[in-house]
Amino acid sequence: MREARRLALIRRQALIAGVARRQALGALAEALAAEDRSRALAARSRQLAAASAPQTGAMAAEVFAARTAFAASMTELAATAAEAAGDAARQSAWQAETLAAAETRSRRLAEREAEARAAVAAVKATRDLTHTALLARKLLK
């Protein structure tokens, strides 16, 4: 029966859409976690750069050079981490859109599945009614 095949197809599509939705949800969670990690790394790097900046007063040239180099590397790391956080934020936005599309598809397929079930039930009811009418005619003869 055509309606049953359509229902089976919609169920398979709904299963695939559910998997896609779960994958999109996982990717969104990963992107948000990466964004949080990058922002935390940038903040900590800025703190370390500020704390290790050369201080006023007398100090040995080697200490001054080491502190300056360390502060510069921490500043560079902070900038790189901030850039990575921006990239992760864009990835999070894209993953959120992907998740929204997957959820919309899942909802549409659920509606189509309900319609297909109703169509199968209607065909079965019509078939049962026809079968009952045929039996009644046979009994009356």
Image: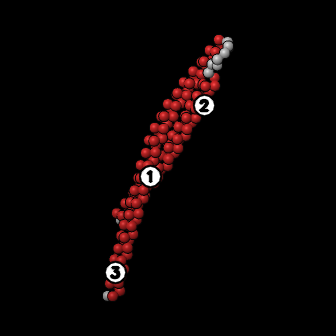
The amino acid beneath tag 1 is Glu
As measured in the structure, the alpha-carbon distance from the residue carrying label 1 to the one carrying label 2 is: 37 Å
As measured in the structure, the alpha-carbon distance from the residue carrying label 3 to the one carrying label 2 is: 81 Å
Q: Which quadrant is the C terminus positioned in?
A: bottom left
**Dot 3 or dot 1, earlier in sequence:** 1
Identify the residue at the far top of this view: 61
Q: Is 32 situated above or below 18?
A: above
Q: Is 29 situated above or below 61?
A: below
As measured in the structure, the alpha-carbon distance from the residue carrying label 3 to the one carrying label 1 is: 45 Å
Q: Which residue is mark 1?
A: 103
The amino acid beneath tag 3 is Ala
Q: Which residue is mark 2?
A: 44
Residue 43: x, y in percent? 58, 32
Element marked by disc 3: helix
**Residue mark closest to the camera, 3 vs 1:** 1
Element marked by disc 1: helix
Residue 27: x, y in percent? 50, 43
- Who's the residue at 41% across and 49% down the image? 101
**Dot 3 or dot 2, earlier in sequence:** 2
- Residue closer to the observer: 6 or 110: 110
Element marked by disc 2: helix
**Dot 1 or dot 2, earlier in sequence:** 2
- Who's the residue at 44% across and 41% down the image? 94
